[in-house]
Image (cartoon, rainbow, N blue to C red):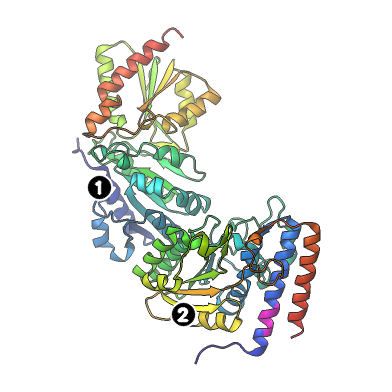
Amino acid sequence: MQDMIDPRQVFANTVIELAKGDKNILAISADSAGSARLNKFRELFPDRFFEFGLMEQTVIGFCAGLALCGKIPFFCAITPFITMRAFEQIRNDLCYTFANVKLAGRNSGLTNARFGPTHHSLEDVALMRTLPQMVVLVPSCPVAIREYVREAAKHKGPVYIRLGSVKIPYLYKDQEKFEIGKGKLLQEGKDLVIITNGITLWYALEALKMLKEQTSLKVGLVDMPCVKPLDEELVFEVSRNAKGIIVVEEHSTIGGLGGAVSEFLSRENPVPVKILGVPDVFACAGPYEEIMDEYKLSPRGIFEAVKEFAESIKNL
Amino acid sequence: MAAELSFSEKVDLAKKAAHVRRKVVEMICKGKGGHLGGALSCVDILVVLYFKIMRVDPKNPGWEERDRFILSAGHKCLALYATMALRGYFEEEKLLSYGSKDCPFPGHPDRHKLPGIEANTGSLGHGLAIGGGMALAGKIDRKDWKVYVLLGDGEIAEGSCWESAAAASHHRLDNLIAIVDRNKLQIQGPTREVMNTDPLADKWKAFGWEVVEIDGHNLDDIFKALSNIPIKKNFPTAIIANTVKGKGLSFAEDNYKFHQWQPTPEECEKAVTEMKKLEEKACKI
């Protein structure tokens, strides 16, 4: 088993690998090269690294102009700033324009927990998901991040990749392949199915171990790293074979993966759905694990939430 | 020696500008409304750019070696559409489909609908960054094409314009030209009263740009300024073009209420007649 690794490092390593084979790939920074782990890129490709300081909205516009001239900019910055401050530029200059720009939100979700709500991002998936043309990726594991950065480079158009900053384990084998628009059924379950992505896949796997040891519930698991386009076929399939769906995500319960799954199921196969995420509040500040646990997004929290949800729908 | 227009070139450009102005008015009348004032104020600049300055091929609008033009103040697009038609990007008759569903001339430019449009502008404060990105791409690839961005003077209250100005000078984009169509009026009234951005030339200078201030209706002035770029190597150029909003249409000139215009049939008749006369006059020079 490989050591745990910072997702930003995987992102940066992959962008460097891609840049070696494609001279049009650029790395763009908004005073963020160190935190985005892109200093190595700057050393290797000084003519393809551009620093802009703190002007995220303008960087998006520059990225659009670069892309319209054949470049493939990878722009990584702190998630709330890259997705929210620059939202209209993303909408018009990237999505409406079909600009081939790759955005990476780093320190996403609650991984900046200690810094407080200005640095949390619990709305980014919801925001990015509303935009036509945008692909929204929330990979869970270093292999998935690497493969999705490669897929993003191949895809012609805007892509948003959500990255945390907490070290994560390798959950997949190195040769595992990931596709835009495809999720992965990791375990079948006739009582409930957990649909998750990002770091909570790791926690859900831990919760499943506890459920197996301590209950008789048959709980399935789906990794859904591509929130948009959603793998509707897979969601439909698992919803037909289980009594309910529980979506687990390090995001607001409004509009994220839970929103995407619920919108689809309410239309195609209405089954009970619970969304386990951060409720409609500005989250509290503190140590990451404690804050995640506060919102039941820890292995223990997921375990408890699954049991409660199973109990609430058992007579339906 | 400074570039100069010959007398016949000036006459030709003046005719073209008058024709574009007439087309703008006709489109608005046909489409039952549109942004008039700013379109008329930037016509002379567009005509000089498209007919004398920019290296473009209207039959091959995606030609990689072309100069790029971005209408950051996208609402002035009727002037751009009419100029492009005259330059040969498409048949002029098509202009009168303006206002109909799915026509290639929406109320703000859409590059998916009309080849030759470089950026989907409309929300103000976006164009200079997009143009800056294009100029940076040109520098990376050591190309000699230039990027021209036309901004409104009301638009530059948007902070993103000044972020872009800082970034352009930081990255030494001397292939980027910002033209401010300074007609001194915006939707609510005089720009100085709505949000004063003076002293404008000093601001651009402070952001590291070379600045030239011109009469934006004087064809010689426009041509000279645009022929002398970069003014200084490694520095982007800002051209502050003093113009009159609604230029050419007597009752709309210098009147902010004609920023957007939904004319009555009587107003249309009067306006079209006036614009035809203006064009006839230009043709008699």
Q: CA distance from mark 2 to mark 1?
A: 43 Å
Q: Secondary structure at mark 2?
A: loop
| Residue A163's disc number | none
Q: Position of residue A99 (x, y in %)?
A: 48, 54
Is B108 above or below relative to A236? below
Residue appearing at x 31%, y 30% in the figure: A201
Is A209 above or below relative to A85? above
As shown in the figure, which amino acid type bears the numbered disc 1? Gln
Q: Is residue B81 left or right of residue B275?
A: left
Crowd band around label 1 with a 10 angstrom C-alpha radius: few (<14), some (14–19), many (20+) = some
Is B86 above or below relative to B105? below
**Which residue matches tag 1?**
A9
**Magenta stretch, residue numbers:** B11-15
What secondary structure predominates along the stretch shown in magenta? helix
**Which residue matches tag 2?**
B229
Q: Position of residue B242 (x, y in %)?
A: 55, 74
**Nearest-to-viewer mark from 2 and 1:** 2
The answer to whether residue B96 shows anywhere in this view is yes
Which residue, as the protein is rendered here, is positioned at the far front? B193
Is A196 above or below relative to B240? above
Given the image, what chain letter belongs to the residue carrying mark 1? A
Which residue, as the protein is rendered here, is positioned at the far top? A315
Q: Toward which corner of the image does residue B172 lie, by quadrant? A: bottom left
Q: Is residue B88 left or right of residue B197?
A: right
Given the image, what chain letter belongs to the residue carrying mark 2? B
